[in-house]
Amino acid sequence: MAAATLLLVLTVIALGSGHGEAFDPNPLQDFCVADTMSKVRVNGVPCKDPAAAVADDFFFAGVDKPGGGAASKRFGFSALTVQIPGLNTLGESHARVDVAPGGVFPPHYHPRAAETALVLEGSVYFGFVSSYPDNRLFAKVLRKGDVFAVPQGLVHFLYNNGTAPAAIYASLSSQNAGLVLLGDALFAGAIPDDLLAKSLLTDRHTVGSIRANFRQP
């Protein structure tokens, strides 16, 4: 009887564990072109009528050169989101990231996505750190044509330690991967100074000095 009960418990755990994975759900149709004008709020973007879909819904031009996307003067990078309405609900997103010589895309992670990065131009030092307690560094200098993969949720970074501009094409395994910049999460937010000081094995003065850098425009 005890063995049968244990088997039942293990079976329930095994069946339930599949529902806790942080991946986008599988689509129920060939495609769901995003209807950005819809006022309906769902987990994603509503679909427009499939009969109204056209080739341009699955197309994006301009990845061959730096774009006018989000930029960070502090860190020396810019990011151009590749907006393809036809990828709605398909569990992926893409971006071109340009990094100036000496610039960085600082340590960060995507809570809902793995990432693969293809170097388009230049060379970069790219890598990730495994989870606690190992904290192993996996990093390489990548050059044009190289691809590097980052498992979901792990802290990673990009550093252009060369003398020429560099660019990568990043592909993420979620429509909404999320982005957490570690420095900003710690120092641009409202975590108390004394808590940060204890957590980082330093003092409140040092925390305050670092925090001041993150509160500058």
Image (cartoon, grey):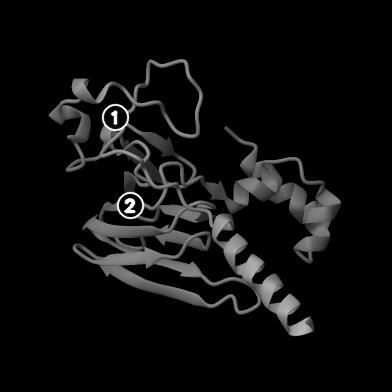
Residue 99 versus residue 130 in the image, above or below: above
Q: Amino acid at mark 2?
A: Ser
Residue at image coords 78%, 55%: 196
- Decide if residue 69 is in sight here: yes
Secondary structure under tag 1 reads: loop
Residue 6 versus residue 87 in the image, above or below: below
CB-based contact (under 8 Å), mark 1 and mark 2: no
Single out the mark in the foreground, 1 or 2.
1
Secondary structure under tag 2 reads: strand
Label 2, residues with CA under 10 Å away: few <14, some 14-19, many ≥20: some
Q: Is residue 108 left or right of residue 4?
A: left
Q: Earlier in the sequence, mark 1 or mark 2?
A: 1
Residue 139 versus residue 57 in the image, above or below: below
**On the rendered image, what quadrant is the N terminus found in?**
bottom right
Q: Which mark is residue 12?
A: none
**On the rendered image, what quadrant is the C terminus found in?**
top right
Q: Amino acid at mark 1?
A: Val
- The residue that label 2 is drawn on is 171
> Farthest residue in the left direction?
55
- The residue that label 1 is drawn on is 33
Residue closest to the eye, 40 or 8: 8
> Which picture quadrant has residue 35?
top left
> Farthest residue in the front direction?
1
Residue closest to the eye, 85 or 134: 85
